[in-house]
Amino acid sequence: MAWWVRRAMQCLPYSRLAVVAVSLPKLSHWQRTKAANIELIPTRRGFHEKLAEQLRGMRILFLEFGVFQGESIKYWLTLNDNPGSRFVGFDTFTGLPEKWHTNFGQVDAGSFDVGGNAPVVSDSRCSFRKGIFQDTLPVFLEGLDATSYDNIVLHLDADLYSSTLFVLAECNALIRVGTILVFDEFPSVLNEFRAFEDWAAAYQRRYTPLLATSRIEQVAIRID
Ligand SMILES: C[S@@+](CC[C@H](N)C(=O)[O-])C[C@H]1O[C@@H](n2cnc3c(N)ncnc32)[C@H](O)[C@@H]1O
């Protein structure tokens, strides 16, 4: 590349929008090359139901990263009735630890604050870990024996790149063949999509996309 082109490019101001603009075609490329035959489900609820159907009767370990008021984890409790299944929800319960830059906007740090209170759930299979993942997850994993579960589901709904990448990297040893990763905001190209791509590349993980909602918002991916 000519020196003056490189020099001119160094003078360009940083623009997050420009990064989004170059990342969106990357997502479309991913869809065309990796997820062309993915099954599309019209609604978020229908998507979770269809996924849970594939795990019907199984003893699952369901880990949710980003709980907020507990809507999704509570729903999963109704979708899997194996008494040996375990559901663990991780959240600060005081909201996002940093600002979330969506594709074309931003959500303030502290959004999704529920006053530090985990949802009230009467199902004894479900528990919560309060605090930032970076503190709570390593401690949880230390004491975990995941060998007796038929399958593992990670529900990644933390919105942020930093949080999602941390969880995937920290859980890398737990994520085995057949593990299902569920993303809630996959088209957020600077966040969940980027974190997934970076993790899969760094750890050389192979996978098959299974299901998505119609606009590829929620995506379920099986690890191969
Ligand atoms: C969109 S909300 C989760 C929504 C929920 N799954 C539902 O379906 O209603 C995202 C949550 O991720 C949590 N979160 C994001 N990064 C986190 C981190 N590093 N540690 C703990 N919680 C985090 C926020 O506190 C927030 O409650």
Image (tube, helix red, strand yellow):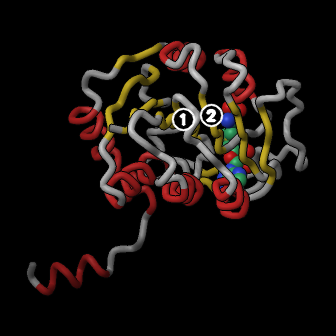
| On screen, residue 119 above or below 215 | below
Q: Earlier in the sequence, mark 2 or mark 1?
A: 2
Cα separation between marks 2 and 1? 6 Å
Q: Quadrant of residue 202?
A: bottom left
Residue occupying image coordinates x 45% and y 30%: 220
Q: Are marks 2 and 1 in contact (CB under 8 Å)?
A: yes
Position of residue 29 measured from the top left corner of the image (x, y, whole percent): 24, 40
- Tag 1, which secondary structure? strand
Q: Is residue 119 left or right of residue 45?
A: right
| On screen, residue 107 above or below 57 | below
Between residue 37 and residue 2, name the one nearer to us.
37
- In the drawing, what numbered circle is on residue 152? 1
Mark 2: give few (<14), some (14-19) or many (20+) Cα within 10 Å.
Answer: many
Q: Is residue 22 visible?
A: no
Residue occupying image coordinates x 77% and y 29%: 125
Residue labelled 2 has its Cβ within 8 Å of some atom of ligand 1: no
Q: Which residue is mark 2?
A: 62
- In the drawing, what numbered circle is on residue 121? none
Q: Quadrant of residue 37?
A: top left
